[in-house]
Image (cartoon, rainbow, N blue to C red):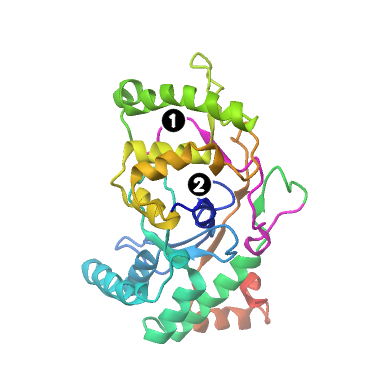
Amino acid sequence: MISIAALSDVLPISGLEPQTVAYVRGLVRKADGTEGEIIEFLESPAGQNVPYVDPVKAMTVIFLHRGLSEDIAALCAETEYAELRTRLGLLERVRFYDNSNPNPPEYVPAPLLVEFLRERRLASDDLVNYLEKVVAAVTVAPIFQGPENWKECWSLAQLPEYKSPESIIEFFPGPPWGESSAEWRNGRFPRWRKEMRVVAADLQKVLGESVYHFSNPDSDVDDDNVHRFLVLHLCCTLRPESLYVQFLLEASGAESVEEFMAAMINPESYAEPFKIEDAFIGLESSPCRLDYTPSSHLNAQRASRSGQGIYPFLDSH
């Protein structure tokens, strides 16, 4: 039987698409000396309050840093994640909504990946210790700001467990996953949107609150704003076979796409308070941008600066 509570547990607070909380650069350089692959940390599902990371991408970067070729680094990362994945529960291998990719990778809690790197000795002690400090620092960095907290930014650790009524509404200027302009005008999205006018009207009658603001097509400053459940319904309509939709079914316990879609337009699923409004401005992050420097180099620079560290943000944790 489908569980809306279990579904909500795998969705972020800020919106369906999580905010980036940090980038770690400096591990890989291209042949021309320019910046190569980076490690990106994302906002967690609601209530988890630690950064999440793509383990395959992160380990590929780490193996490239160790000097492996691109093909071998990617193969090793896939092999190691296959080992790690056998230990993980659902909330420890989440697929997040990605507006440009219907088949997003799995993300895991960053502290868990750091411990796996240490256990398997997949990176130098220096790099593992550095990443551990990054995760700790990024967790408490005050980087989230939005309509609820203009005066004082929140850290990832301070994000509320429950979504605000406004954050459940998605800013929705167009369909996800790369539909062409012709498909946008004549394809499944406009047909779905037309069907949703009837569905939204029926839901509003029962719930007493609008679930869909339909934009004026003649206005350049008006866009759709939609309850997140209807966005998930659209995902099922456009790409029912996608990895993201299959993850939604697993997370919710739905036995079929049809059962999941029915739940997304069932008034009984709308237990969390919500308020339709312009969601263009919401809870957003100012991600940390960090450059890895081996501790031997860092210590030399500290000494030259009379003990003044160039990474005080990390030194304090």
Q: Relative to 212, does residue 115 appear above or below in the rendering?
A: below
Which residue is situated farthest in the top direction here? Answer: 218
Q: Is residue 162 magenta?
A: yes
**Residue sitting at 59 percent across and 28 percent down?**
204
Which quadrant: the C terminus? bottom right
Which of the two labelled residues, at mark 2 and mark 1, occupies the earlier sequence position? 2
Q: Residue furthest right?
A: 151
- The verdict on residue 179 being magenta is no
> What residue is disc 2 on?
16
Horizontal relation, residue 60 to residue 72: left or right? right
Residue 75: give x, y in percent of width and height: 24, 70
Q: Is residue 24 visible?
A: no
Disc 2 vs disc 1: which is toward the camera?
Answer: 2
Whether residue 9 can be seen here? yes
Q: CA distance from mark 2 to mark 1?
A: 15 Å
Q: Amino acid at mark 2?
A: Leu
- Please report contact status of discs 2 and 1: CB closer than 8 Å, yes or no: no
As helix, strand or loop, the secondary structure at mark 2 comes to: loop
Residue wearing tag 1 = 174
What SS does tag 1 mark?
A: loop
